Amino acid sequence: MNNKTLNKINSLELKRKILHILIGITTLLLLIYNIITPLIIFIILIIGIFLSFLSLKFKIPLISWFLDNFEREKDKTALPGRGIIFAVTGSLLVLRLFSENIALASIIILTLADPISYLVGKIFGKTKSLLNPRKNIEGNIAGALISGLFAMFFVPFYLAFSASLTAMIFELLVIKIKNIQLDDNLIIPLAAGTAMFLIVRFLI
């Protein structure tokens, strides 16, 4: 990757995307090998939310280092660790709402779709999306294809690619509830899981 390419990618965002992938894959492996359960994930979520609010008032050694190195400035004063909190929430919801295979496929789509979309869009993107001019069609196609390929480890190809494509379409949308914008990390797994559930329920 040359300097010109690196200049297109915000260094903070690059670190965030790499961390996102590492956390997602680690979570997925822990779930597959039954090392963690939805209950443990719920406990982690509660602790994470508590630490997030606590860090607004106090410097917590390890948490502060993490926020200084990986958090966007706007989130440091709103909801520190917002991305991880919503990713954990999205993962927990799909684990409770859907069958195991659909949930795991949704989590791998969450893990890969957005980071791949961002990186490919920044490096190769030329065509702006009609749904969201901040995003490139090339990035979304790459995110859908690559996350769909990995989702095939858990579900048949037609479910994997239907889910990844649905997730990337919803990722383009700006969804707000009472002026609060929903995070991609919550939208992507729920959109993917819902797409697979509806196909299995009504079309197969």
Image: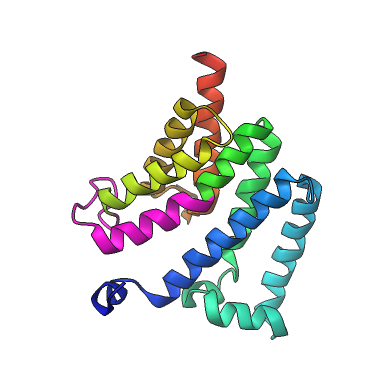
Q: How many marks?
A: 0
Q: Residue at x 54, y 80 (%)?
A: 69
- Observer-nearest of 148 and 199: 148
Residue 23 in view: yes
151 vs 51: above or below: above
Residue projecting furthest to the left? 126
* Residue 29, image x, y percentages: 68, 50
Residue 125 forms part of the magenta stretch:
yes
Could you tell me which quadrant the N terminus lies in?
bottom left
* Residue 101, image x, y percentages: 63, 33
The colour mode here is: rainbow
Residue 55 forms part of the magenta stretch:
no
- Observer-nearest of 37 and 149: 149
Q: Residue at x 45, y 39 (%)?
A: 148
- Observer-nearest of 122 and 191: 122
Side of 47 relative to 177 (left or right): right
Side of 124 relative to 185 (left or right): left
Q: Residue at x 68, y 34 (%)?
A: 100
Q: Residue at x 69, y 86 (%)?
A: 59
* Numbered range of the magenta stretch: 111-135
* Residue 98, image x, y percentages: 65, 32
